[in-house]
Image (tube, rainbow, N blue to C red):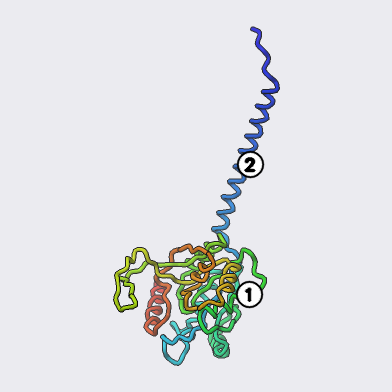
């Protein structure tokens, strides 16, 4: 049976359409896979990291003749243990450490380093009048900061920070410059909000978290945040995350650790020693 020849022009267009569609689908699939691989690499690869360890405080609540950061924790100064904890956590990654310490304490720190044969590489930065001022000094001492570099700000008074917490914060902070990262733990105590008249009201602790350090950020953005807030009252900022938020940054929370206690009072040293002993016995 005779059949009318098919429209060659139609088939040409149809064939071209199918080829283009196939090429588009393959290209889209390639781009999609590439983006997935990039995302995976971002979550598993450390960016170049600068760790700032803040030890510039006077430790007035701690008391005693020895500065809190130099108090011995199981035979070693608290500050040394904090530096070692950060350095171990970032081992294998491109990182550097800056320690913020009042210049008046530098000679004493040098003596302690010699006494304990301490050789973890770090640079010293003079502390400020406030914690804000100390972090500001450290950030302004940085030069040639790369666009993807991460900065971690850690309290020297938290010498027991687990390596897993440090790495989790560093990895998350490297994913987006718009987001800062803080480790948190749920509250266990009941909480009340006090008003100016001496009264108080209960607060639902389920919606609250206790914030720890290190806190992680894109280095360039945190430098900008501190530069833009330098003329403000530093007491309005409770931590580095609050400075970051002041210029529009957003904060992501990751799991902290209850062992990551802050040495504030002499009794905290006893608790920290017990935690160290349990780790060694485990």
Horizontal and vertical percent position of residue 53: 53, 77
Where, by quadrant of the figure, is residue 146 drawn?
A: bottom right
Residue at mark 1: 142
Of residues 205 and 259, which is closer to you in this image?
A: 205
31 w.r.t. 170: above or below: above
Quadrant of the frame with the C terminus = bottom left
- Mark 2 element type: helix
Determine crowd level at label 1: few under 14, some 14-19, many 20+ residues with C-alpha closer than 10 A: few
Numbered circle sitting on residue 70: none
Q: Of label 1 and label 2, which has the lower sequence position?
A: 2
Residue 120 seen in the figure: no
Of residues 97 and 174, which is closer to you in this image?
A: 174
Of residues 117 and 147, which is closer to you in this image?
A: 147
150 w.r.t. 261: above or below: above
Horizontal and vertical percent position of residue 143: 66, 73
121 w.r.t. 10: above or below: below
Residue 250 seen in the figure: yes
The reply to whether dot 1 and dot 2 touch (C-beta < 8 Å) is no
Horizontal and vertical percent position of residue 117: 56, 84
Residue at mark 2: 27
77 w.r.t. 27: above or below: below
Q: Residue at x 30, y 79 (%)?
A: 198
Horizontal and vertical percent position of residue 4: 66, 12
Quadrant of the frame with the N terminus = top right
Of all residues shown, which one is farthest toward the front? 197
């Amino acid at each position: 049976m005779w059949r009318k020849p098919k429209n060659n022009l139609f088939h040409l267009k149809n064939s071209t359409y199918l080829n283009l569609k196939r090429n588009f689908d393959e290209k889209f699939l390639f781009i999609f896979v590439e983006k997935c691989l990039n995302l995976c690499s971002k979550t598993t690869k450390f960016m170049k990291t600068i760790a700032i360890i803040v030890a510039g405080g006077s430790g007035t609540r701690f008391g005693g003749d020895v500065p809190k950061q130099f108090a011995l924790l199981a035979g070693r100064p608290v500050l040394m243990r904090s530096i070692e904890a950060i350095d171990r956590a970032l081992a294998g990654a491109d990182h550097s450490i800056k320690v913020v310490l009042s210049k008046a304490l530098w000679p004493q720190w040098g003596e302690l380093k010699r006494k304990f044969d301490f050789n973890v590489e770090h640079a010293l930065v003079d502390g400020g009048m406030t914690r804000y001022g100390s972090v500001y000094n450290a950030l302004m001492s940085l030069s040639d900061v790369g666009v993807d570099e991460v900065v971690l700000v850690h309290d020297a008074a938290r010498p027991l920070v687990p390596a897993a917490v440090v790495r989790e914060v560093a990895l998350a902070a490297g994913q987006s410059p718009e987001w800062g990262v803080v480790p948190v733990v749920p509250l266990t105590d009941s909480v009340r909000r006090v008003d100016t008249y001496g009264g108080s009201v209960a607060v639902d602790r389920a919606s609250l978290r206790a914030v720890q350090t290190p806190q992680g950020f894109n280095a360039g953005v945190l430098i900008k945040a501190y530069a833009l807030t330098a003329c403000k009252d530093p007491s309005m900022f409770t931590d580095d995350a609050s400075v970051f938020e002041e210029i529009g940054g957003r904060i992501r929370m990751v799991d902290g650790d209850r062992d990551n206690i802050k040495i504030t009072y002499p009794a905290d040293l006893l608790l920290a020693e017990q935690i160290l002993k349990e780790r060694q016995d485990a």
